Amino acid sequence: MIDYTKLYKKYLYKKNELSFTKEVVIEKIMKKFNAKSFSKTEVLDLINDDQLEYSKIFECLVIDDPQVLLGTFSGKEKKYHKEELNDNQDNPLDFKKIKKAEWSYNRLLLDEQEGRRIDIFLESKDGHYISEFIVRDRCEKVNSYLNALIVGALIQTGKAEYPADIENEYFQYYLENLNKNNFLN
């Protein structure tokens, strides 16, 4: 059982240190996961995403270092990727039927599905802090880390979608992520 009262007290003590600018977030992600920048134009379906405002996406990062990926995916996620790999081998993509301009995009999707890359898309509506993010494909460790990095600024600027209330399940999730990623120590 998680002691949210204890986590909340630690959060109150540290909360002024938990608000990170977009530049600091990018630096931390790049350092922790050996991530690299890439252009949002490489991801053809991103313009139609209903979670992020395309014009406000300021950074796309890829984690594709095999050693980093090995230590980043959970056992359950690795199992999912193996199933996707087997399915894609049984039902291969026919590149003859794909427009040449879409080959690299389809390769990107296969690499996400099969666990050879994780893509991170970052949005900033105010130009200073990250307002939203997406992690593709299935990686709880990266999702957890980003949540811990980003929500503090949203709370401090009054832009969080939920209150800093110990009874709120989303805030509890944030506290868990702060703790899991050692931001409360």
Image: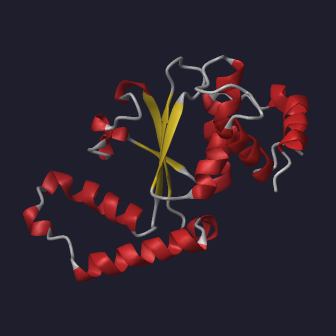
Residue 178: x percent and y percent?
76, 44
Image quarter of the C terminus: top right
Horizontal side, residue 55 vs residue 118: left or right: left
Q: Residue at x 45, y 67 (%)?
A: 116
Q: Residue at x 38, y 65 (%)?
A: 113
Q: Residue at x 51, y 38 (%)?
A: 133
Tell me if residue 156 comes above or below residue 168 in the rendering: above
Residue 27 in view (yes/no): no
Question: For residue 82, which quarter of the picture?
Answer: bottom left
Tell me if residue 145 comes above or below residue 106 in the rendering: above
Residue 33 in view (yes/no): yes
Residue 122: x percent and y percent?
50, 36
How many marks on residues? 0
Residue 46: x percent and y percent?
32, 40
Tell me if residue 102 comes above or below residue 147 in the rendering: below
Colour setup of the view: secondary structure
Image quarter of the N terminus: bottom right
Residue 177: x percent and y percent?
72, 47
- Furthest-left residue in view? 97
Horizontal side, residue 137 vs residue 148: left or right: left
Horizontal side, residue 81 vs residue 160: left or right: left
